[in-house]
């Protein structure tokens, strides 16, 4: 009934509304629902996973389920008290930046329905790291729920300069560690929609950033959000550089900027900028996960992100070598029951392998 209601009733209504307006509505509703026991109970009774344990400890952090909300949805940390009720074991808040950012001009979000993709042009819209720290310090963290924080550089002309961009990252990283907010941190080097572009996705550019970040004391696992449009040789060069720093793992990966990879590229307006999430990221992400696992074995924790639209997509990423999963677009296209369905499938997978 839950699946039927979402797919046949609610989704058609929502998909006739402007995408960012729907996003803002659900953030507002979720924020309010999380403040009330009844709201948590209603969501939890429908969507929270309650079956055999799928707990997993990764880099010293215990996840009640290995399915996380990817960065880019709860970019201001307003849902950090409710997402456990819809089947997530954790989330990546953000990306957060040193200064508040209004993001790019609208429209910033568009559905490509036949292609099962979203055109994302948010431009790192967020309230800034200090405001988000203040909000999270006042937020009651659900028991067992994991807060990751994605860190990027502010999307403004000031941070387009390399030195200023590095300082932007360092300020947020330093403040989060000083306040001990977040269970892990992800350095987002691959957001395609900012001033200066993906300025840290080459070894020569990434090295000075990681060198500066290494000077800031941290006791939390640190990951790198990787681009997925690089050929394997260039991708592996980045991994080789990352290997020389105290980085625990990688998130594979970020948005796809090649609109021709979509099943129906005509759905994306020719003059529309932004990266693509969803099905267009599926194969690229999984192939890079598999190659990373084959080459680097257990050196890197791998968080699989990109194109998880079904349970079988999630299983494919785990089989390829992912330790944890992140998703957004699948929740939108398939429905909020997807996270619970993935956890159910994992119990069968673990039983099979045992």
Image (cartoon, rainbow, N blue to C red):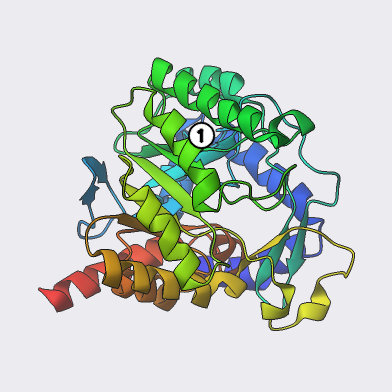
**Mark 1, residue position:** 34
> Which is more toward the observer, 195 or 310?
195
Name the outermost residue toward the left. 354
Report if residue 67 is visible in the image: no
Q: Is residue 148 above or below residue 19?
A: above
Picture coordinates of residue 330, whole percent (x, y): 55, 65
Residue 352 position by quadrant:
bottom left
Up-down relation of residue 288 to residue 19 (above or below): below
Q: Is residue 220 above or below residue 64?
A: above
Rendered-image quadrant of the C terminus: bottom left
- List x then y, in percent, for residue 22: 73, 51
Q: Secondary structure under badge 1?
A: loop
Residue 64 location (% of width, % of height): 28, 48
Instruction: Write the residue at 22% across / 52% down.
Output: 55
Residue depicted at x 61% and y 25%: 98
Vertically, is 10 above or below 159? Answer: below
At a point 67% along the width and 33% down the height, the residue shown is 154
Identify the residue at image location x=20%, y=56%: 53
- Left or right of 57: which side holds 101? right
């Amino acid at each position: 009934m839950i699946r039927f209601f979402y797919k046949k009733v609610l989704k058609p209504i929502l998909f006739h509304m402007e995408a960012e307006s729907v996003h803002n509505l659900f953030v507002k509703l979720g924020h309010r629902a999380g403040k009330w026991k009844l709201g948590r109970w209603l969501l939890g009774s429908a969507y929270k996973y309650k079956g055999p344990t799928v707990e997993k400890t990764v880099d010293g952090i215990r996840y009640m389920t290995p399915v996380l909300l990817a960065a880019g949805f709860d970019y201001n940390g307003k849902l950090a008290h409710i997402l456990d009720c819809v089947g997530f074991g954790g989330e990546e808040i953000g990306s957060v930046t040193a200064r508040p950012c209004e993001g790019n001009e609208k429209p910033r979000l568009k559905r490509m329905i036949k292609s099962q993709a979203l055109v994302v042009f948010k431009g790192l819209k967020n309230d800034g790291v200090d405001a988000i720290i203040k909000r999270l310090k006042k937020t009651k963290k659900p028991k067992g729920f994991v807060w990751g924080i994605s860190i990027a550089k502010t999307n403004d002309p000031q941070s387009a300069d390399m030195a200023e961009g590095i300082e932007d990252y360092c300020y947020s990283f330093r403040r989060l560690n000083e306040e001990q907010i977040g269970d892990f941190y992800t350095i987002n080097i691959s957001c395609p929609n900012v001033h200066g572009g993906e300025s840290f996705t080459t070894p020569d550019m990434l090295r000075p950033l990681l060198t500066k970040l290494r000077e800031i004391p941290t006791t939390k696992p640190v990951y790198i959000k990787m681009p997925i449009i690089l050929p394997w040789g260039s991708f592996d060069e980045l991994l080789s550089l990352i290997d020389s720093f105290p980085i625990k793992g990688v998130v594979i990966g970020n948005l796809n900027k090649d609109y021709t990879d979509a099943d129906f590229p005509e759905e994306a307006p020719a003059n529309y900028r932004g990266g693509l999430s969803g099905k267009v990221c599926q194969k690229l992400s999984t192939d890079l996960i598999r190659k990373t696992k084959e080459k680097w074995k257990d050196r890197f924790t791998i968080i699989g992100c990109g194109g998880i639209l079904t349970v079988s997509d999630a299983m494919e990423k785990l089989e390829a070598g992912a330790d944890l999963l992140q998703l957004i677009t699948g929740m939108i296209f398939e429905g909020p029951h997807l996270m619970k369905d993935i956890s159910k499938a994992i119990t069968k997978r673990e039983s099979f392998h045992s």
